[in-house]
Image (cartoon, coloured by chain):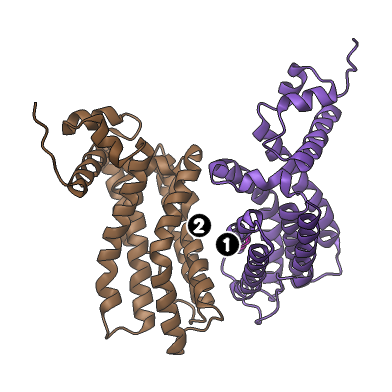
Chain colours: A brown, B purple
Amino acid sequence: MTRIVKPATVRREEILDCAQRLFSRQGYDATSVNQIIVTLGLSKGAFYHHFSAKADLIEALALRFADDAARMAQPVLDDESLDAFSRLSKFLASMRDSKVNAAFEVRNTFEPLFRPENAALYERVEEALFGVVRPTLTRIIAEGVAEQTFDTSNAELAADTILGLMGSTRRAVTDLYAARNAADFDRAACDLVERYRYLGTVVDRILGLPEGSIVLSDPQTIRFMIDTWRREETAA
Amino acid sequence: MTRIVKPATVRREEILDCAQRLFSRQGYDATSVNQIIVTLGLSKGAFYHHFSAKADLIEALALRFADDAARMAQPVLDDESLDAFSRLSKFLASMRDSKVNAAFEVRNTFEPLFRPENAALYERVEEALFGVVRPTLTRIIAEGVAEQTFDTSNAELAADTILGLMGSTRRAVTDLYAARNAADFDRAACDLVERYRYLGTVVDRILGLPEGSIVLSDPQTIRFMIDTWRREETAA
């Protein structure tokens, strides 16, 4: 049997595509590295050249997801006509949407990250994502301070604090994952909406903006999540 | 050989005292459950009746430490003459001091909590500590809102956010632990001071207080830490 030798980057993407497909369809636990190898007709060596364990696949998928999200946010960053406030609003909304989407649409893939035993992996992933986002957020905040729209004594710590706040929705997201019936899910979704609403007011204050400037809560997105969840539950 | 049968609570405290002494003296890694058993002249069964693994000892020590801290803070909570602002200031300062002390004075005991592989344990401990502190903090904030000293739309989320902020110093504390020379230690200590200073201004804003009301940074405590660290390094 002749194996087709592909460039390493192509191979890596194929492995990630396959892993994401299998995780989404049958869940993380039910998917084995071996199944991925067999599905792709790979040698074990080819797989382990790229990834040392199944957990590495989640980390890589999360980072790929973050890269996509960063690409989606790029026009906002490049748009010279935006002032720092509009840039920040759009940037935070795109972060929230990425997070909510990741939490929901691809929840079979990322659900394992939210389990207590995977706390170290969650933190590795979060730290990697924050590493991508922090410099951008710091730059936007520093711009706003220069424009005298924002008022904060330390743009970098402001960015770091805001990221930490976005991360503080983790428990509400964990509750969404854990919901086993519509009532639990609604409760967790409402909690998430209220948290985002409150965090919006905290970000306003951190940056010295008038109350209600930053809107993180988006009932539409949450409504979409609830509807999809219900449809899937009914179909299941 | 006759084993002395002691009340379970006394035995449990003895095990914790012994574990803390050994962890502090020789470090967590170098201490085995067996050494604790031998030191106390216990049966294995007596030990495992109370704790299922070495990691449980850290969790229990952290909670005991938190109980001590809560006891230390009790007079502040009971003092009827204090307004909500003074109560909050004193309460946050006592939390910070407990944390800094835990991070430093008993660092051989708690250092393992700050290792990436122990992230799940760290979170279990943090969640347990926050569970103790959250209701008290919520109550103080609600008092301040009632007194119209504080201005926040949700006392519980305000408390939760402030706790999250206190938790966000974790990386700076981790850097303190990781410092291998005086320059690294000074840098980590300065970072921690600056973080606490900045977080003080964030708490001011979350509660609608004038800038500079909440002072979390205490250069004296940090100076004490640096001096002690230096002394120990020189002695080592």
What is the three-letter code of the residue carrying label 2? Answer: Ser
Q: Secondary structure at mark 1?
A: helix
| Mark 1 and mark 2 on one chain | no
Location of residue A180 in the rendering, given as x and y in whole percent from the top left corner? 41, 36
Mark 1 crowdedness (10 Å alpha carbons): few <14, some 14-19, many ≥20: many
The tag on residue B73 is none
Q: Quadrant of residue B138?
A: bottom right
Q: Quadrant of the N terminus of chain B?
A: top right
Is residue B85 at all visible to an observer of this figure? yes
| B201 sits to left or right of B96 | left
Pointer 2 residue: A168
The one of B49 and B134 positioned closer to us in this rendering: B49
Q: Secondary structure at mark 2?
A: loop
The one of A72 and B82 positioned closer to us in this rendering: A72
Mark 1 and mark 2 residues within 8 Å of each other at the beta carbon? yes
Subunit of label 2: A
| B53 sits to left or right of A149 | right
Q: Quadrant of residue B177?
A: bottom right
Q: Residue at x 76, y 26 (%)?
A: B35
What is the three-letter code of the residue carrying label 1? Answer: Thr
Location of residue A90 in the rendering, given as x and y in whole percent from the top left corner? 33, 72
Range of the magenta residues? B161-166
Q: CA distance from mark 1 to mark 2?
A: 8 Å
Mark 2 crowdedness (10 Å alpha carbons): few <14, some 14-19, many ≥20: some
Location of residue B69 in the rendering, given as x and y in whole percent from the top left corner? 79, 52
Is residue A223 at all visible to an observer of this figure? no
| A107 sits to left or right of A146 | left
Q: Is residue A198 above or below residue A151?
A: above
The tag on residue B161 is 1
